[in-house]
Amino acid sequence: MAELTYREAVARGIAQEMERDPSVFFIGEDVAAAGGVFKTTEGLLDRFGPDRVRDTPISEQAIIGAAMGAAMNGLRPIAELMFSDFFAVCWDMVANQIAKARYMTNGQVALPIVIRTANGGGARFGAQHSQSVETWMMAIPGLKVVVPSTPLDMIGLLAAAVRDPDPVVVVEPKVLYASKGDVPDGEIVDELGVARAVREGGDVTICVLGAMVPKALEAAGRLADDGIDAEVLDVRSLVPLDVRAIADSVERTGHLVTVEENPRLCGWGAEIASIVADEKFYALDGPIVRVTTPHLPLPSADVLEDAAIPSVDRIVEGTRRSLG
Amino acid sequence: MSDTDTAEGTEVADLEARLSIYRMMQEGRLFEERARDLFLQGLVKGTSHLGIGQEAIAAGFAAALEPDDLVFCTYRGHVHTLLRGAPMAALMAELLGRATGICGGKGGSMHLTDVSHGAMGSYAIVGAHMPIAAGAAWAAKARGTDQVAVCFFGDGTTNIGTFHEALNLAAVWALPVVFVCENNLYMEYTAIGDVTAVEHPAADRASAYGLEPILIDGNDADVVHTTAVRTVARARSGDGPSLVEAVTYRHGGHSRADPGKYRPDEEVAEWLRRDPIPSYRERLLAAGADEGTLDAIDRDALAAVDRATEEAREAPFPDPDTLETELWADGGSAWRN
């Protein structure tokens, strides 16, 4: 057992998979010699050499396109997009090419690709380096999407993503890179499509993801002081989505809150709210409440960004509202 | 085109190989003419982009490739896919939306793919396949497979970002890939010269990536073939990518919807005179080919197209149950439990 930071967990996860499988290669901007702009990939170049850990030019279309072509010809590439906002730069590769190739060719093309990316706000980077784009990916058939919220999940979900035969986007909340957690020794492999209750409770289900997980836990602690026993469900995987875990929890609690860092419209919580309203309507004893960032670009100033991203206070308030 | 290479002074392939190139061009031509007829009869839906007039490029390269090599082409990719060895009836069935189509009816005219023959896809977003081809070449190099990737694209692609990103990456990583610009003088409805800062849209950009400018007559199958042999050998030997600009002309419009009226009549007439197939036939006759042999190739090609058409037209439509298959590697499309 060791205590690792989330950023150290990224490197450990990649190393674990590269060690295991010689067809795993890793590319991205500043990932090799510099060890990543977030220092998430330090040591990989020394350990695996420049053929398998490779710096690219600032060419997001070429990075993601090359990963696709390499996957079509026998590699299992991991590609890093430095900031998730850059998906907008290479969206054709992601949404039109990678997501559709298998279906369009009726299964002729297998694409075991992992795209890792630093996502979300809280770092005062302004509107073009702070977005929560996991819902973009979720909206495109053919992409799997996971969001690890702890160092242990980072390793386990990355390993699951690398071993998955389909394209998986691993979304890393950049404000969590310095966070710490205990990680057992030895190989760690998790499973895509499995949510996890990080706090059990019987009064209300709070569905949460990524950087909002620690905030929801803090909110649940505060609610407990008032006698409200919240279940905090870390959704972890948007595609595949663990609807069963969500529905089972709502069945027990009768109340649902989603906490989303993404802007309001078409957030992942809206999909969950829709499913629960459809399939668990009669289990609900109150309104479904979504706590989100307003439908705005993220501002840079501390005060403004903090006002935008869901806070512990807003989660507490939203949860109370769901209880009627 | 005084500034392009010609067959004169070029060492050409032996007669047998050239007869094979002739056969490939003729099969491609007759296949696409049939596809056009089926469109006009309303049997093929959607759109199609025919390469009638451009066959020398696909054929000249096809003849230079090994079975394991990987070809990436565009939505104007019927002929490239066919000439890699994809079964003609399955291609025709795909155009007709049949269950026996090469993509089970999920691809259509713009997405013909036959991975088992190294036809790695027809890409319908301009330029997308350039970095993808580079990536396949990267994997070939990383795995030491000796494969070469060949990426065909149009002149319009030279003005999109992926062209430049892919060429730079391929050059800096010395990847075994040959990029082949089929410059048919029109990006879609607009003359490429009207929207491009240089005269030769691909060749004039080669030096930006440290590559030799290669500008050839894309209607001369011998020139294309010798260029293909040279550039593919360079890639296979580890010397890195090449960028070829092959000048050609499509006899028709950009797509099914386009009669191509923006082109001057004299220009069209001139290029019809330079049709790559009749001129190649004349050249083979002059080189000693037997007229009967060439006639037999023509007959056999037509018979093959007739058979493929008949087989495709008799094939069933896809089972609606296949709608939700093959999104994921497990064969299904589930996004939730």
Image (tube, helix red, strand yellow):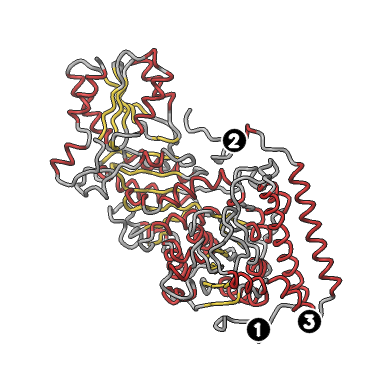
- The residue under label 2 is B323
Residue at 48% in and 68% down? B192
Residue at 43% in and 67% down? B195
Residue at 63% in and 82% down? B6
Look at the numbered disc 3 and give the secondary structure of its residue. helix
Amino acid at dot 1 = Thr
Amino acid at dot 3 = Ala
Locate residue A159, reporting x and y percent: 43, 43
User: Residue B286 got which mark?
Assistant: 3
Q: Quadrant of the C terminus of chain A?
A: top left
User: Residue B10 got which mark?
Assistant: 1
Q: Give the mark, 2 or 1, whose residue is nearer the N terminus.
A: 1
Locate residue B89, reporting x and y percent: 73, 50
The Cα atoms of the two marked residues, 1 and 3, are separated by: 16 Å
Residue A44 seen in this snapshot:
yes
Look at the numbered disc 1 and give the secondary structure of its residue. loop
